[in-house]
Image: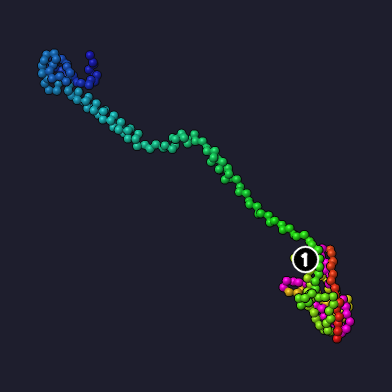
Amino acid sequence: MKGRNSVSIVNEIKCARCDRKYSGVRSRCPYCGARRIGRGKYTEDSDNAKGKMMISVLILAVFTVAAGILLFTTPVDADANDPGDSLALSNPDEDIDTVHSLQPTPTPQPTPTPELEEPPLMDITSLTVTFGGRPLGESFTEPRGKEIGLQLAFEPVGITLADDFNVEWSSSDTDVFDVVETIVGMEGRYGATVTIIGSSGNATLTVTVTNNGKELSWSCTVFARG
């Protein structure tokens, strides 16, 4: 039998007839059959116990609801707790690309200009002196004071001239005629101007060409007349 200070879920009441206690859920006394009248002797204490129990249940419910709200409303940092970040492995292909991007770009080198080969030097095979577009013969006669423009041509055409190339015109007797080297035309052809000095006599006109260490000469006789 429970002590007086213990708290039971169902309150007990005391029968007014036989003075025995029975469960408050009964409407009659199980011992004498007397009908329950009023609240019974311990109804006030029972009501206080019920009130305290209800307050405890309400407080517990409030704490439960508050805990649930905190649990479902607190944000969770998924990125901070993601174990994949700490266990991620580097991609070998990305590492290779990174190394390539860090390497210095080679400076393009200019393409060397190929050196043009100079054609081989050739010897001059023949000389020709012309006057008025016609070749001069072995001799010609001109009056005193006459100036004659001559042009020099040599073969083969288009020959490469050496560094020692030289043309020299000469008169064997300047009292008969004088000769001065000139450049003829826009093409820079080699020529000379012959001036008759004397009124009689004759002298030899000679032109000598030096190329590639070799000489070639041409000559004719000039007659002066008064």
Quarter-of-image position of residue 165 = bottom right
Residue 11 drawn at (x, y percent): 19, 21
Quadrant housing the C terminus: bottom right
Q: Amino acid at mark 1?
A: Pro
Residue 66 drawn at (x, y percent): 31, 34
* Residue 222 drawn in magenta: no
* Residue 210 drawn in magenta: yes
Quarter-of-image position of residue 51 = top left
Task: Give the structural element (helix, strand or loop) at label 1.
Answer: loop
Residue shown at 87%/76% (left/top)?
204
11, 168: nearer the viewer: 168
Tell whether 85 sits left or right of 22.
right
Tell whether 68 sits left or right of 209.
left
The crowd level at tag 1 (other Cα within 10 Å; few <14, some 14-19, many 20+) is few
Residue shown at 58%/44% (left/top)?
100
Residue shown at 17%/17% (left/top)?
22
Residue 211 drawn at (x, y percent): 81, 65
Tell me if residue 43 comes above or below residue 212 in the rendering.
above
Number of marks present in the image shown: 1
Tell whether 95 sits left or right of 33.
right
Residue shown at 33%/32% (left/top)?
67
Quarter-of-image position of residue 220 = bottom right
Q: Which residue is mark 1?
A: 156
Can residue 99 be seen at all in this image of the molecule? yes
Q: Which residues are magenta?
A: 186-212
Magenta segment, principal secondary structure?
strand
Can residue 192 be seen at all in this image of the molecule? no
Tell me if residue 79 comes above or below residue 49 in the rendering.
below
